[in-house]
Amino acid sequence: MKSIFAFLTVAVFLVSCNPAPTSSKSSKGALTSNAAEKVYVAPGEYDDYYAFISGGFSGQLAVYGLPSGRLFRVIPVFSQDPEKGYGYNEETKPMLNTSHGFVPWGDSHHPDISQTDGVLDGRWVFINENNTPRIARISLETFETVEIIEIPNSAGNHSSSFVTENSEYVVAGTRFGIPIPQRDISISDYKGNFKASLSFIKIDPEDGEMSIAFQIRMPGFDYDLSHPGRGKSHGWFFFSMYNSEEAHSLLEVNASQNDKDFIAAVNWKKIEEYVKQGKGHKEKVKYAHNIWDDDTHTATSTMEKEVLVVNPEDVPGAIYFLPTPKSPHGCDVDPTGEYIIGNGKLAAAMTVHSFTKMLKAIEDKAFDGDKYGIPILKFEAVNYGTLVQPGLGPLHTEFDTRGNAYTTFFISSEVVKWNVKDLKVIDRHPVYYSVGHLMIPGGNSRKPFDKYMIAMNKITKDRYLPTGPEVCQSAQLFDISGDKMELLLDFPTIGEPHYAAGIPAEMLMDKSKKIYKLEDNKHPDAVKTEADSKVIRKGNEVHIYMTMIRSHFSPDNIEGVKVGDKVFFHITNLEQDYDVPHGFAMIGANTSEELIMPGRTATMVWEPKEVGVWPFYCTDFCSALHQEMQGYVRVSAKGANTPIKYTLDDEVPGEEEE
């Protein structure tokens, strides 16, 4: 207890003693002109890498360029986005469906890029949602969310969404132990009664579609982070955990009593074979599986009703516990698959386990008891060595191709470069301030692209112009190509970035989709020519089948709508040129704008409340006559006899002029 308070006292002292800010009147601060040249991307030139940085509590995924640090796009994933109409229009609302109903917000944490043979293949990005447990898949052809699957029997989906080296599985580990199945039980009865799930989600090798292959029912510890084995350890997955005490209150004290917690080593290939034999048991659950169809431009949501569960005691030899200093956060595997790094965040040392020694310990039955039937391997039998006093508060580690590791230290606000095999510190560099994750493009693979490293900082006071009580988070870019890390740039990020994934730009640029061909548009309400635009009443519903093209809507004058009607605008963008989206907004609509890409169809719902003539307009500047791209809807009183009437240039679209 006293040691914990002493540690926290030192931590507070170190955080309060961060370097003083560089004033605007000082010379060049932390950067040199040479560093500035290294991040300069001339107008019209491209960045070398894409960086996909999680938006944290924004629920989104941001796309930056490296080395410039320019923000290119925010991809809506788990939260509504009024810029693009995601989660507001009828086509994308199903993407945010869950077993709890429509959930318009999420907490996105850890993106990971699909791999083939342990090397990034640039097909998809997967990212987890922490609050309402979900995994999303984003297409790197369209840079859009194309699938979200909810994770049942889970809470606090934190140790995800990391991908095996042939994209066989993406995992989702629960952070919080919960009653499974959920029931009314006293929280004080946590120990032994609350459980956890490690979910292995199968990825279809052709289209990427996800399905929950099996869940492993684990003791009710808190599963924090995970990484797959690779190379020699391919077929295993490693999960860090804390709270092996199974405390249920004041965890900062009560979950720090044991000298060591664990890393769970899971032989998923062994469990996969067990499942293929028809073993395991089905449990009734309820979870949403939401899929986007790029042909119909529409998402569908299906409620699944069962999941396959595997108990560790039924698959002897599939799961082991590796003792690791208390409260490990990061759990990282080097590119060779030999070294498993366990970062006990309350320890002033780095623990390195050996996969080879782990196998030998299993063979020799070098056990130190068990927890709920899961063997605990002896620490000395699996431990490769310890990096002594590298810094305070170790969190996360990434790797280069030269045998070096880079670890973030939250308390001492630095990144430390060290050699994994020799267990020697090579370099250290301060960051500003309190760093969490870091990312080297391809760092979670057999082939890192070790030119750049990004440190993602939690605190940025004094780094940027003040913007009130809330400050932004910061990403700092380092050149790691030499022996010494060189700070090149820092730039603000959206939300709170947790993890990031990076990939060379040349692997994605040529496959990026430019338009959607009109002839391939299979949306049931698509209108592919102005002549086919129309307005139809169906009871108290009015369906407006509208087209948009520079610089008008068809139709642009609509009458016969009444108070109390439910009006559906089915809008198709007829453009077939790259980079000509159009927007649509309707006064009084309780949704958002629609931003519709060339060749696509989207639907907005509007329920007029007042009599009058109400305008709509294009929200995306599309041409010199963008301001003229507008129209009107006449709304009559409920029960009025005003007939449906619609025109373009005072003519009915499609009718020949007499």
Image: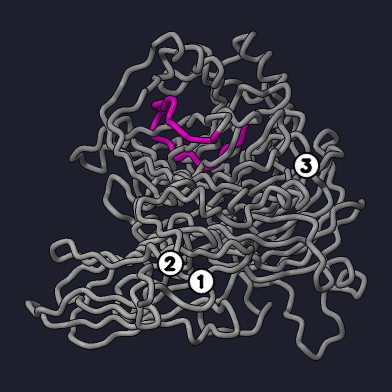
Q: Which kind of residue does numbered mark 3 sit on?
A: Pro
Q: Residue furthest bottom?
A: 25
Quarter of the picture containing the C terminus is bottom left
Labels 1 & 2 near each other (Cβ < 8 A)? yes
- Residue 510 appears at what percent x and percent y? 73, 50
Q: Which kind of residue does numbered mark 1 sit on?
A: Ile
| Residue 336 in the image: above or below residue 520 | above
Q: Residue 1: in sight, yes or no?
A: no
Residue 633 is inside the magenta segment: no
**Mark nearer the N terminus (3 vs 1):** 3
Q: How is the image coloured?
A: one colour
Q: Where, by quadrant of the figure, is residue 166 drawn? A: top right
The residue tagged 1 is: 549
Residue 226 is inside the magenta segment: yes
The residue tagged 2 is: 530
| Residue 182 in the image: above or below residue 610 | above
Q: Nearer the viewer, residue 227 or 15?
A: 227
Q: Secondary structure at mark 1?
A: strand
